[in-house]
Image: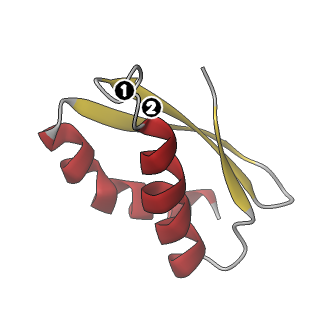
Amino acid sequence: MKDKVEKVLESLRPYLQADGGDVELVDVTEDGVVKVRLTGACGGCPMSTYTLRMGIENRLKEEIPEVKRVEQVF
């Protein structure tokens, strides 16, 4: 599943990079929790929670039904 998650993140990466940020995959647990680190401008952005939930998490769940949630790692 880690490869699938990485592919989805790759498709989202240009949107984050356009605003000076990026996303790094930290881990995918066996129970479907994806752990990511937002970097660059996204790391300290007040909208990062919105980006994480409405952007990254929704897209991952849509593409990979096994994903249960996405957590941000600092």
Kindly state the secondary structure of the residue where label 2 is placed.
strand
Mark 2 lies on residue = 38
Q: Residue furthest front?
A: 46
Q: Residue at x 19, y 39 (%)?
A: 17
Indicate whether 16 appears above or below 38: below
Question: What kind of residue is marked 1?
Answer: Cys
Tell me the quarter of the picture where residue 46 sits.
top left
- 22 sits to left or right of 29: left
Q: What x and y, as percent, mark residue 16?
A: 26, 43
Q: Name the image colouring.
A: secondary structure
Tell me the quarter of the picture where residue 44 sits.
top left
Q: What x and y, as percent, mark residue 48?
A: 44, 37
Indicate whether 20 appears above or below 52: above
Whether residue 6 can be seen here: no
Question: What kind of residue is marked 2?
Answer: Leu
Q: Quadrant of the N terminus?
A: bottom right
Q: Residue at x 13, y 42 (%)?
A: 18
Kindly state the secondary structure of the residue where label 1 is placed.
loop
- How much space separates mark 1 and mark 2, taking CA atoms? 9 Å
Q: Residue at x 42, y 59 (%)?
A: 55
Indicate whether 63 appears above or below 25: below
Q: Residues within 10 Å of mark 2 (few under 14, many from 20)?
A: many
- Please identify, in this view, whether the residue under mark 1 or under mark 2 is nearer the observer: 1
Mark 1 lies on residue = 45
Indicate whether 15 appears above or below 35: below
In the image, 13 versus 19, the foreground residue is 19
Q: What x and y, as percent, mark residue 11?
A: 30, 62
| N-term mark: 1 or 2 | 2
In the image, 4 versus 67, the foreground residue is 67
Marks 1 and 2: CB-CB under 8 Å?
Answer: yes
Q: What x and y, as percent, mark residue 58?
A: 52, 68
Q: Residue furthest right?
A: 31
